[in-house]
Image (cartoon, rainbow, N blue to C red):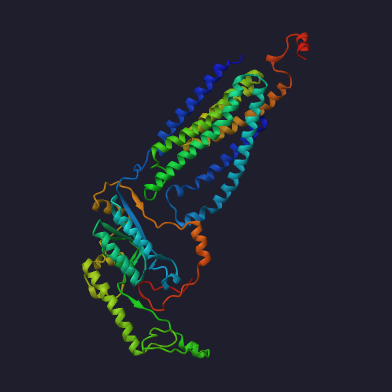
Amino acid sequence: MRLREWQLVTIALAGVAAAAALTFLAAHLSEVWQPAPPLRLPGARYVALVRVEGAIAYKTSQLTLFGLTLDAEDVARLLDQAADDPMAGAVVLLVNSPGGSAAASEALYLKVRELASKKPVVTYVREYGASGAYMVALPSKAIIASNSSIVGSVGVYISILTYGDLLEKLGVRVHVFKSGELKDIGSSHREPTPQEVRVLEGMVEEIFELFKQRVLAHRSIRDPDEVFSGKPFTASQALGAGLIDGVGTLDDAIQLARELGGLPPDAPVRELEPPRPGLLQLLLGRLTSSKPVVPSIEIIAMWPPPSTQP
Amino acid sequence: MRNAAALRALLAALSLALQPIAGSFQPWASGNFTPEALVSMLPLLGILIVVGLLVIVVALASWVLRVLGWGSLCRSKQGRFYCITRIVVLAAPIIGTLIMIAGAVVVALQLALAPSFGRLLPGGLPEGALSVILIGSVVTASADIFEAVATLDLGQLFNVRLLTIASLVFLASSLLGAASTTAQQLQYVSHAASLAAFALLTAGYHLARGVAAAPPPSLQPSTPKQAGERA
């Protein structure tokens, strides 16, 4: 015997109600509705995470020719963003950098110092926190490194590649007409003269002195001679030398940042990222890009030294 | 209707086959977005994309056939419930999908504005947005539920026992399907039940088609004179 229409509709609607009940019950019982710390809506105080990954340089630096670099200006903007946002209760710098250009590293150091005067900054060193990257980390309230990381290599250098002998073998001559004796200092076409060596060494010494003073201002170093020899340290060695405050994980650094910032233990972490270029920007960028002409001398605070491999 | 059921049986079989592959994406669910993890997922992603496109085409084809099938039953004036079923089968999947998309957009926006570091899934989904997604899932499932009840009536109309049984299995699989939206443990069972339901429906509709070659009992004239009057 066929059911009547109203009976069919009633059964169908009852089925829909049963499906709804089962669905919400299943969701309630399953993992999906047992959230890890519930997401907070925008407006809750958070820990800002800023990555410092890759060689520290400006876009036009010669270091950009040697592989993955981060644009120091982008990072500086993110640090400003963290400083200006009242909801950012603390900042974690995730450092994985061998250093880079001394000028770019110093610019970021000054930014971090300014930021650290406003809110707690904790640095976590993932793989490398060497040379210029270590300088950037100096103003942090605490520096924590992963067990297998390399820290230190405090120092700067200038590297000049000369191929004058090769040119001579090839019968190539370079003629330079200069206004002053030191105008073409650092030229790759010839060996540096003793006077040029003295000038370059003076430049390195002056920048290094600045680096040294900053390390001494921010850290209690146990053996300055060892640290300022440019030696890279493992995490445990760095802890013994007074270069870092602890060996741990990123979670440890985040938790410490929460404590220093007076944030609850489940305060969310928000990674600040530079804006991605739009499609138009990418297309136009490709159409207008050309190999930059870069200076051949750059004071570098970096370990290990940049490779010429692509 | 028979062809639509056969296509849905194929879809259910594909879903069952894809379950193990979907589990391979667990590293993503754990928040492991390293380049190595992404590269290792690429072949699977390729397979999923190809199969996914096939599933979409087959699902659309079966949906069109179902709408047409219930439409022709509505026009045959066998009962108004078939007309209601046609409307629900037509509209509910569209509305339900739109609701689920809206819920997913809300989740994405909230995650983008205030993300948790590391793990994105499972857990940590905003409850409000999840409710929206579940409502969408229920609305989508209502099409199957109405269809199951209409098939139950068809089974009684054409006196095909297999169709009646198939409709009950279909109803159960629809309820399971809705519940398995969030309960991963139920998905295998749900897909298996769907496969069984659609296989039974295919056979049931095939039998009913044979029965329907003669006019259904409700329209059979009681006397030859009445048959002549109708002509």
Closer to us: B23 or A20: A20
- Tally of numbered tags: 0
Task: Judge by depth and name the residue closer to the eye, A218 or A23.
Answer: A218
Q: Is residue B95 visible?
A: yes
Vertically, is A39 above or below A281? above
In the image, A44 versus A30, the foreground residue is A44
Residue A135 falls left or right of residue B28: left
Residue B56 at x, y percent in the picture: 60, 41
Q: Residue A91: tell me if it is visible.
A: no
A12 relative to A80, above or below: above
At x 29%, y 63%, the residue is: A111
Residue B46 percent location from the top left of the image: 57, 51
Question: Can you give x and y, in whole percent of width and height, for residue B21 in the image?
Answer: 54, 46
Asked if residue A69 lies left or right of residue A9, the reply is left
* Residue A88 in picture, x, y percent from top left: 30, 52
Residue lying at 36% horizontally and 61% vertically, measured from the top left? A75
Q: Quadrant of residue A65?
A: bottom left
Residue at the location (55% across, 33% down)? Answer: B93
Front-lying residue, A45 or B38: A45
Q: Residue lying furthest front in this view?
A: A179
Task: State the quadrant of the N terminus of chain A.
Answer: top right
Residue A211's quadrant in the figure? Answer: bottom left
Vertical position of residue A239 compared to residue A33: above or below: below
